[in-house]
Amino acid sequence: MSEVGGARAKRMPRAVREQQMMDAAVQTFGQRGYQAASMDEIAELAGVSKPLVYLYLNSKEELFVACIRREAKALLEAVRSAVDPELPADRQLWAGLFAFFTHTAENPDGWAVLSRQARTEPFAAEAALMRDEIVAYVATLIGVAAQETHRATDRDPELAERDVAGLAQALVGAAESLAIWANETPGMTARESAATLMNFAWAGLGNLMRSERWSPR
């Protein structure tokens, strides 16, 4: 084969090369952090030259933002695709939690980018967008649970919009913290993490749905 023919054989489609560079960037940022990571490391891991990385993405900051967006989209899609709206509310919440913890366990570098590196300036706004989407989705699941309780008991669970928003924020915050801890704890599985949070959250949600509110006396 001629040199020209060999070069053509090795030439990759743009999408494949971008995927390689993004995978390398997520691994490097996730393991070393944004400040410590270098474009030289990313290029070497991806098997390309540094000028080629800059050709595709103009700067280290732009590359990191692209990583945040890709990993956030993948996480959201994993959770949404796992939830069957035909299932009872508790099974929907369980499916979403299990998908969340499975994804974060199977993609530890991507989760490190989202949960740690992306929370610092100037990237905090990107991370906040991802979190807002997850919170909004969890709020819909809580709303489904409230409606299901109303149909089953013919009693209004009296969950105001503010209650639902607060519960969604609390549940997402707990899931994020638990996922960070689980990824650093040997032997902790996604199923265990999801069950831990499900037992913690569903008992409290169940009381609220039955209008059994705790209050300080």
Image (cartoon, rainbow, N blue to C red):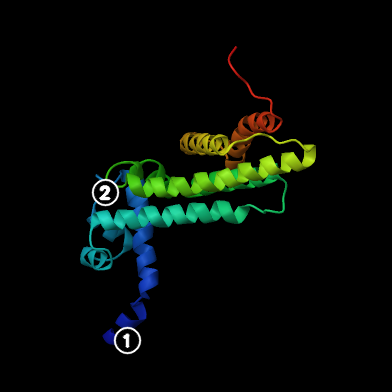
Helix, strand, or loop for circle 1? helix
Helix, strand, or loop for circle 2? loop
Residue 105 location in percent, x, y?
Answer: 51, 45
Residue 116 location in percent, x, y?
Answer: 37, 40
Q: Callout 2, which amino acid? A: Ala
Residue 206 location in percent, x, y?
Answer: 69, 32
Looking at the image, which is closer to me, 92 or 37?
A: 92
Q: Quadrant of residue 203?
A: top right
Looking at the image, which is closer to me, 150 or 15?
A: 150
Q: Quadrant of residue 43?
A: bottom left
> Which is in the foreground here, disc 2 or disc 1?
2
Going from the N terminus, do you reach mark 2 or mark 1 first?
1
Q: Callout 1, which amino acid? A: Gly
Which disc number belongs to residue 119?
A: none
Side (left or right) of 96 relative to 42? right
Q: So how many labels did they put on this image?
A: 2
Q: Which residue is mark 2?
A: 37
Q: Residue furthest right?
A: 153
Side (left or right) of 203 relative to 168? right
Side (left or right) of 59 relative to 87? left
Q: Which residue is mark 1?
A: 5
